[in-house]
Amino acid sequence: MNLENILVDIEDGIAVLTINRPKALNAINDQLMSEVGHLFSEGLDFKSLNGVIITGAGEKAFIAGADITELQNLSTEEGYKLSKKGHDIFDSIESCTIPVLAAVNGFCLGGGNELAMSCHIRIASKNAKFGQPEVNLGLIPGYGGTQRLIQYLGKGKGMDLLLTGDMINADEALHYGLVVEVVEQSELIDAAKKKIKKIAKKGPAAIAKTIQLVNAYFDKSANGFVKEAYGFGDAIGSDESTEGVSAFLEKRKAEFKK
């Protein structure tokens, strides 16, 4: 697929995906959503990567929401299909077997916040602002916002933001656990890369299984504790675990293989 809205830079095993629609504050349109879906389905070679960073072009916005011009005059069926497409694509990010970090710069609203929440970890610049303002347009979040926001903020604060359309700043997002770190904008990508490099030193199979099991906690059709028990059994019997435990006992650095 020809990427019209996303810049891809791969270096040292880290793919940096930059949403590149700065004149539209990087708003999500259908083409951009398709490009994200392509990258997380077949466009990236995850076996050769240690992690992915998603960020926005410019200093004003990560993603300021959906492209409102595309939402006019949609039928009920078209609205459902649009939402389902977003769910499927963001689920593919959430279930990715390597860490996906959102490096949030500026406005992170609506569909942008929903994309960020589908990433495993979020780091924000000091000027970042988060929110789900859909009710201001007589709409509701369509890409998982009603489900993921309460996971991170709790039902009380999550409901507050969903019903008022208010925004929270980077420090508030850190307080509530939506982001794990707040840095100067000039340090944002470096901070995200540092996080991925730290994770890359751990067992890759263990990282992939941990992501799967954390996601299972929120899967109402699955018993996360049962999955964890089986996952632990698989891990403890693996060559990766043998190397990790041996290295610890021998007081040396583990040499994990992808």
Image (spheres, rainbow, N blue to C red):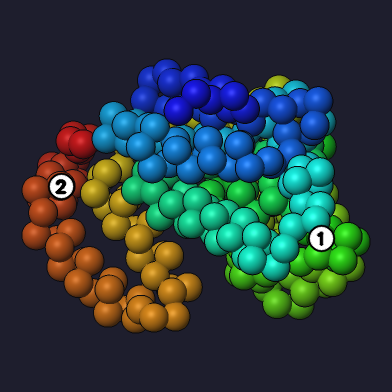
Left-right relation of 23 to 254: right
Dot 1 alpha-carbon crowd within 10 angstroms: few under 14, some 14 to 19, many 20 or more: many
Q: Is residue 94 visible?
A: no
> In the displayed structure, would residue 65 be above or below residue 200?
below
Quarter of the picture containing the C terminus is: top left
- CA gap between label 1 and label 2 equals 46 Å
Dot 2 alpha-carbon crowd within 10 angstroms: few under 14, some 14 to 19, many 20 or more: many
> In the displayed structure, would residue 24 be above or below residue 8?
below
Element type where label 2 sits in the image? helix
Q: Is residue 17 visible?
A: yes
Pick the residue in front: 6 or 80: 80
Give amino acid for label 1: Glu
Mark 1 vs mark 2: which is more N-terminal? 1
Pick the residue in front: 226 or 175: 226
Q: Point out residue 181 in the picture as x, y percentages from the top left corner.
A: 64, 44
Give amino acid for label 2: Glu
Left-right relation of 130 to 120: right
Q: Please tell me in which quadrant of the rendered image residue 107 appears.
A: top right
Q: Residue at x 54, y 40 (%)?
A: 34
Residue behind mark 1? 134
Q: Residue at x 77, y 74 (%)?
A: 159
How many marks do you count on the picture? 2
Q: Point out residue 19 in the picture as x, y percentages from the top left corner.
A: 64, 31
Residue behind mark 2? 240
Which of labels 1 and 2 is toward the front? 1
Pick the residue in front: 11 or 92: 92
